[in-house]
Amino acid sequence: MLRPHVYEAIYKTVKRAPDLDILEIGGARGGSTVAIATAMRDSGKQSMLVTVEKFEGGSWEKTYRSPAYGDNYSWWQRNVRKFGVQDWVALYPHGVTDETADEVKALLGKRLAGMMLDADGWVGRDFKHFWPLITPGGFIIIDDYPTSADNPHEKKQRTYHLVNQLIRWGLFEITSRHADTVIGFKPHGADYSRLDMNRLQAISDAHDRGEKIEW
């Protein structure tokens, strides 16, 4: 779970966003799902939030015991219903891969108001498939992005390096930080052709080998 002020920032960001579909990758037990969908409901939006969550735990398993699939799904479902936002949410209960990305896109409109990423830290994959759908100026929220690579958690280290590269390519601009969650936007005129998956993979591989990332 994120801190209350982070959910508040997410809520405010979504509430002022255009009435277009929103994508959330990594819904966990539903905290951010509820914050996003509540903002959509309260601002009278007719669009949908598509949440991608496979309910299998993930990078936190090394530190915390991860509940079983059924437990995670039940928690998410209860939270969405408790806050009365189920009519604004469509669930895709699998992970995003190159093979499943089109299935997720089929649930979305042609343009997105924004996306929130809080899955496995492999944000390059998510930018590859969904960044082109975001309207210019649309919001991008990324969790687990620390202030430096010295953070001991593996997912946060990976996210730190990959997001920094995306920023260098001009594909993401940060406007505010709330703990380890950053909120920003897709810059107008950004050049999608600068996204180099081979470069992102090389960064990820170097990180896995414990090597210093060279810029």
Image (tube, grey):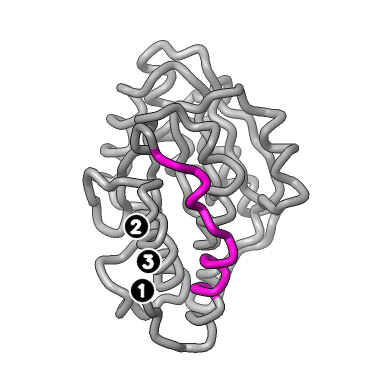
Within the image, what quadrant is residue 167 found in? bottom left
Which comes before the other along the chain, label 1 or label 2?
Answer: 2
Our reading of the magenta stretch's main secondary structure is: helix
Which comes before the other along the chain, label 3 or label 1?
Answer: 3
Q: Which residues are magenta?
A: 190-204
In the image shown, does 132 or 86 lie closer to the viewer?
132
Residue 130: in magenta span: no
Residue 128 x %, y %:
58, 48
Residue 59 x %, y %:
54, 69
Please report the residue visible at 42 percent of the width from the left and 32 percent of the height from the top. 36
Name the front one of labels 3 and 1: 1
139 lies left or right of 128: left
Residue picked out by circle 2: 168
Q: Amino acid at mark 2?
A: Arg
Q: Residues within 10 Å of mark 2 (few under 14, many from 20)?
A: few
Distance of label 1 from label 2 (alpha carbons) = 10 Å
Q: Looking at the figure, which quarter contains the C terminus?
A: bottom left
Residue 201: in magenta span: yes
> CB under 8 Å between callouts 1 and 2?
yes
Residue picked out by circle 3: 160
Q: Residues within 10 Å of mark 1 (few under 14, many from 20)?
A: few
Residue picked out by circle 1: 215
